[in-house]
Amino acid sequence: MADLHDRWVAERRNEHYYKLAKKLNYRSRASFKLIQIDDRFGIFRPGDSVVDLGACPGGWCQVAQERTWPNGHVIGVDLRYIRPMEGVETIIGDITEDSTMRELLNRFNGKADVILSDMAPNIAGHYSTDHARSIHLCTFAIDVCDRILKKDGKLVMKVFMGDMFDTLMAELEKRFQSVKVHSPDASRPTSSEVYVISQGFYGKSVKLKNVNETDKKPEFKAKGGFI
């Protein structure tokens, strides 16, 4: 097992985008995925407000901050601590819990122009399980859109391919004018991940659970129930 891990670390260090991230002071090779997505789909505009879910170590936040400069507003949310960076606010918390959703709603003044989600589950190594967990996380990203995304806003979301993908796409197509699947060049060829680029949020009113009430045990559940 240690040999496999050591081999993975060695391959990662020799990988083009890993080296490029180090050279350009990005916190993650994943920064180039978002750069390539933005270059192709025009996600960001100067002054945009952005929420980045699953933000650690902060590579996507860096790109969002650069591309919404000078008056952009970027908030990164993750379970893990994100080292401070200029022009970016952070929240340490689990977006599937009421307390984190409350904090995001309280900290985010107004509505977001863009929601980003590079969230990924802890990998079990079982394809169906990993896919189901990925879809589950996507439901929470969609719920964040329902709560704080502006009309005509955008969502960029990572998902692992699998048998529930079409159902996820149907949920997105109910909410957005344009939904496209894209695999940026910076993604590893062996990865099952794709990015769903959703633009033109309809902003329809939906019935949402009130997360502003303090519960003894958070029971926040994403709306939709499609898994």
Image: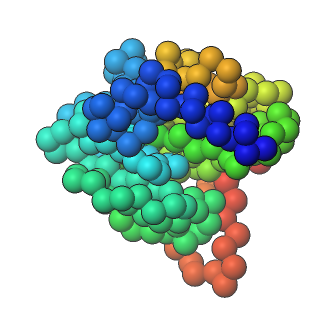
Is the N terminus in the top left, top right, bottom left or bottom right quadrant?
top right
Q: Is residue 200 visible?
A: no
User: In the rendered view, does 110 fall on the left or right side of 47?
Assistant: right
Q: Quadrant of residue 157?
A: top right
Residue at 54% in and 61% down: 79
Q: Quadrant of residue 32?
A: top left
Across and down, in percent, residue 181 comes to 59, 19
User: In the rendered view, does 192 fall on the left or right side of 40?
Assistant: right
* Residue at far left of view: 70
Q: Is residue 129 visible?
A: yes
Q: Quadrant of residue 59?
A: top left
Across and down, in percent, residue 15 comes to 50, 24
Is the C terminus in the top left, top right, bottom left or bottom right quadrant?
top right
Residue at 83% in and 34% down: 127
* Residue at far front of view: 3
Viewer-proximal residue, 16 or 2? 2
Viewer-proximal residue, 108 or 14? 14
Applied colour scheme: rainbow
Residue at 36% in and 59% down: 83
Across and down, in percent, residue 117 comes to 52, 41
Viewer-proximal residue, 71 or 176? 71
Residue at 63% in and 43% down: 120
Across and down, in percent, residue 21 comes to 37, 32
Q: Is residue 31 above or below residue 141?
A: above
